[in-house]
Amino acid sequence: MIWLDRLLKRRRISDDLSAEIQAHLEEKTDALLALGLSREDAESAARRAFGNVTALKERGHDVWVWPTVESVLFDVRFALRQLRRAPTLTAVVVLTLGIGVAATASVFSWTRAILIDPLPGTGDPNRVYALESLTASGSWTPTSWPDFRDLRRSLTSVSGLAAAYPTSVAIGDDAQAERGGTELVSANFFDVLGVEPAAGRFFPLTRDNAPGGEADVVIGYRLWQRRWNGDPSVIGKVVRINRFPFTVIGVAPRSFHGSMPGEDIDLWVPAMMVNQILPTANSLLEDRGWRTFRVLARLTPGVSSVAAGDEVRRVASAIARREGGRSEGMSATLLPLWQSHWGLQDTLRAPLVILLGACGLVLFIACANTANLLLARAAGRRRELGLRLALGAPRQRLARQLLTEAAILALAGSALGLVCSIWLARGLRAIVPASGSSLIDPRMDTTVLVFTMALACGVTLIAGIAPALYGSRQRLGEALGEGSRGTSGGVQAVRLRSLFVVAEVALAVISLVGAGLFYDSYRNTRGVAPGFDADHVAMGSVSLALAGFDSATADALLARVADRIAGTPGITAVSYTDYVPLSLGQGSWEDLEVEGYAPERNENMKIYRAAIGPGYFDVVRIPVLAGRGFRADDDSAHAPAMIVNETFAQHFLRGRSPLGVKVKGWGRWFTIVGVVRDAKIYRLTESPAPYFYVPVRQVYRPEYGYTFLARSRLPVAEAVSAITAAVRSADPGVPTYNAMPLADYVGVPLRGQQMAASLLGGLAAVALVLAVIGLYGLLAYAVGQRTREIGVRIALGARPVQVLGVISRNAGALILVGLGVGLACGASLGHVLSSLLYGVGSADVPVLAGACTAMVLAAAAAIAIPAHRALRVDPIIALRAD
């Protein structure tokens, strides 16, 4: 070998080392000769391999362990060439990973907007907690301003305590008034949350010293852009809020939406200006029983949430004991923002966690499917990998090359998923149509990008590690031997691929069971009778507080609008209420005292209610079982009247005749004049609970807003227009909102369940398709590798049934194992989710059977094509194949 002598002299390598290198080259040459190469080609290939390695090492590169930029670029180029040669595999892998990443990233953006970062724009949000009052029975309730004031004075474990009362206001003059969300806040609200103004300043801390004072307002960034086009000179301008002039002193930053997760607040007003915003709420700042404020606490540095929570409970209990009366037995608790009851997170917390889990299942199936396909590709390339090992490639190098291919696929799939997630993330608009832009258009910023990159890394490891380890452990002799026998890549590869298929089947079954459970729950909920008739009823809401109405003028306006609506041809009944059944909120409650009833210890006597106008039960068709409904003369000049539902009468009166019984509320005694049938108030799935109705004309609270209801023989759209026109003609300064058919409004919660069931069903369908792809890939590859064996069997007289048995035996075992694992986990899943389901048992046999049947049918479809190929094998061609 003259070339070797020249190479050794040029490199000045020692005799011992030269002998070692020569032996190494001869070993590689012999291995290549065994592959059928000529001596000249074998020596040339061995020489090139050795020359490349030594040349790189002479430049200081250790390409096998610590990759350089040059070697990484080489790996990427080589991987791209390899993937270009397999376009079908590349497209399938990128598409499946893109689906999994898109679904997961979308639900993550929702989860982040509601649970992880519910108050964007705040400083160090992990130190901000919600402080909620607890009744004697342990249920949560908002906090009164006097309680907030006493807690702020007494607590030492929090560096700041802020209060906010969300409400709606009319912004602008009567001719251009718009409805906007606002918060009446304590002066330190922005300081506690760590918010910096985008322009101007925030409220001075002395602003809480006394009611009244300067009429200052801080406007939201979106209102600033929408109404003033971002003009910096807005500072100092006067804007009318509920017809009262306020001076703009600051603008909140773009990222800050207020203290209500998922909603956009347009402006913030000092709580001391409550009388200017809500003229009839003159006792809100003094009445300890008027619990309307949300309280947020920032923990003192170094103080744990457990220690702060203990102090909050201790101090709140002491305040309740000291005050007595309506505060007796009350306490307070400290909760992370994602656990608080204010905002949409209380409603969407469980569905989002379930959706995130379902997306995780789909992503894991996509990873298993990718690993399966890459493992099949690595098994098909075992001859190539064996040759590269024979040429001196270290095993770490082969593993890195295969991981590079997986990483490129994962990055491509993640990029596709991220692009799709930007569109899918806005799908929450269909689930929560009343949510703010911060939730409808969740942020796709650095956090989401980092999360997607983390997903890509995780996908690379999960999907690429098994093929990389398998490919790097190839032995030349085994690779050649297996190739000559036509096996399916070795026992190790078959076991790994079988494990992935079992995992895919099991995860797909779990997804199907979860979707089936939620669909059954939705179907059962849809079949529940609400107890009232929403068909052919139109609605339109107004907020009289926006226009600064007092009790007398509001009563007159409500009556005037109702009369005008009733005068529309085709309208058969008209009324109004401060709470529409099946609204997203729970409405209002009142502490009651029932004549002749002694409450049990710690019994909650805060009973929810609705204030309604005359004719309400005729509009919604709730039957009056005893007594009468409200009349026009049930006003402030007559004795207070009350109507209760069946459950109220059964629970509090216990066999007594309800008519004429006295009930104390609002500091007055009401007389029960009627009993109506139970109707669903908050949710279709709720159990019957005591509920009562009072006349709007006797219990007027303008801050609640009112909704007109009209039953009509006309098309509902015309009745909606009639309500809007009647309000406009009565007072152009009162805006109308939520003008729609009542059936559409009360169907919003059910539509959320429908969308959740649809999303879970879609994810389950994707999981099923991915599992079928994985199973098909395993069988198709197995048939291709066992073509010679199948040909021999057919040549020896094997019947088609026997050939099918050979193909489907192993697949059937894998499917059975996957079904068993999936059904066991699915039954457990039903038990875990039982509290979120309605009318569905913890082990729903039809759902389990349906999931099993769907998986078996899908598996049969996956088996059919490879089986058909096996039956068409020509023995002559198969026996000639290598």
Image (cartoon, rainbow, N blue to C red):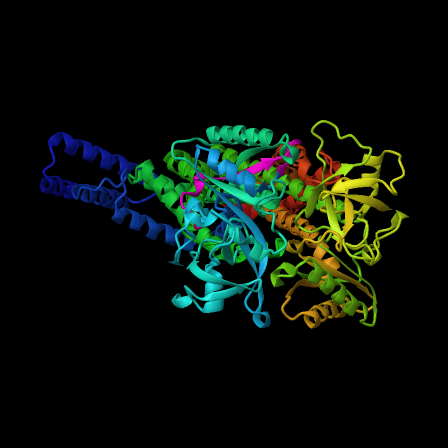
Front residue of 745 and 374: 745
Asked whether the viewer can see residue 800, the reply is no
Residue 846 magenta-highlighted: no
Q: Position of residue 716 (x, y in %)?
A: 77, 66
* Residue shown at the point (26%, 48%) measured from the top left: 69
Front residue of 99 and 338: 338
> How many discs mark residues in the rendered view?
0
Query: Residue 568's image quarter?
Result: bottom right
Image side of residue 526 versus residue 302, left or right:
right
Image side of residue 516 versus residue 49, left or right:
right
Q: Quadrant of the N terminus?
A: top left
Image side of residue 518 versus residue 451, left or right:
right
Q: Position of residue 165 (x, y in %)?
A: 56, 49
Q: Position of residue 748 (x, y in %)?
A: 68, 54
Q: Position of residue 427 (x, y in %)?
A: 58, 56
Residue 124 magenta-highlighted: yes
What is the magenta range? 121-140
* Residue shown at the point (53%, 28%) measured from the top left: 314
* Residue shown at the point (42%, 64%) measured from the top left: 236
Asked whether the viewer can see residue 187, the reply is yes
* Residue shown at the point (40%, 50%) measured from the top left: 408
